[in-house]
Amino acid sequence: MKIRVRKELIDGVLAYSREMHPREIILLLGGKAGNDVEVNRVVVPPKAIHGLGFSGFQQYMLPFDLSIVGAVHSHPSGSSSPSVHDLNHPYGKITMIVAYPYRSVDDITIFGKRGQMLPFEVVVQ
Ligand SMILES: [Zn+2]
C-alpha cells in the first residue's frame, strides 16, 4: 500500500496544529482509498471537541462518506507514537499524528490500523 499526501494538506495541518497548540486538533482525512491511499483534503468532524490533552468526536454524528480514509490529530506532548487510545480507536485506514513543534513533514507520522508505521510520499500538484 502506497500513501500519497498533498503538500498543501501537510502545510495546512501543521499550521492549524501550531495555531491551536496546546490544544489538540482532530480532522478527518478525505481522499481515495484502493490499493493505494491518496489523501487530498481534510474534513472538520461535526461536534469536534477541542481541549487540553483530549480531542474526540462522536462517530455516529459523521456524515456517511466513503471518501474518508482516516483521521489526523496532533500530539501537543511532542510524542510521535500512537497512544493506547489511538490504537484502540482507529478511524479509517490511516491515523496521522502531528507532533509538537509541528515544524515540518518530519513531525508527521502515519500509522495503519494495527499501529504499524506507514511510509508516505508528499505530492505537489
Ligand atoms: Zn494520539
Image (tube, rainbow, N blue to C red):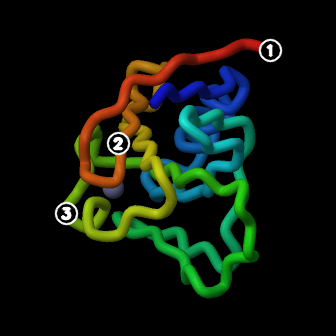
Ligand number 1: quarter of image: bottom left
Specify the farthest residue to the left: 84
Q: Position of residue 122 (x, y in %)?
A: 58, 17
Specify the farthest residue to the top: 124
- Residue where numbered disc 1 is placed: 125
How packed mark 2 is, by other alpha carbons closer than 10 Å (few <14, some 14-19, many 20 or more), is many
61 sits left or right of 87 in the view: right
Which quarter of the figure has residue 64?
A: bottom right
- Residue where numbered disc 2 is placed: 111
The answer to which of marks 2 and 1 sits earlier in the sequence is 2
What's the residue at 19%, 63% (across, down)? Answer: 84
| Amino acid type at mark 2 | Phe
What's the residue at 71%, 43% (across, down)? Answer: 31
The answer to which of marks 1 and 3 sits earlier in the sequence is 3
User: Which residue is more in the foreground, 107 or 19?
Assistant: 107
Contact, CB < 8 Å: mark 3 with mark 2?
no
| Disc marking residue 23 | none
How packed mark 1 is, by other alpha carbons closer than 10 Å (few <14, some 14-19, many 20 or more), is few
| Disc marking residue 84 | 3
The answer to whether 86 is drawn above or below residue 102 in the figure is: below
How packed mark 3 is, by other alpha carbons closer than 10 Å (few <14, some 14-19, many 20 or more), is few
Quarter placement of the C terminus: top right
Q: Position of residue 15 (x, y in %)?
A: 62, 34
The answer to whether 93 is drawn above or below residue 49 in the figure is: above
Secondary structure under tag 1 reads: loop
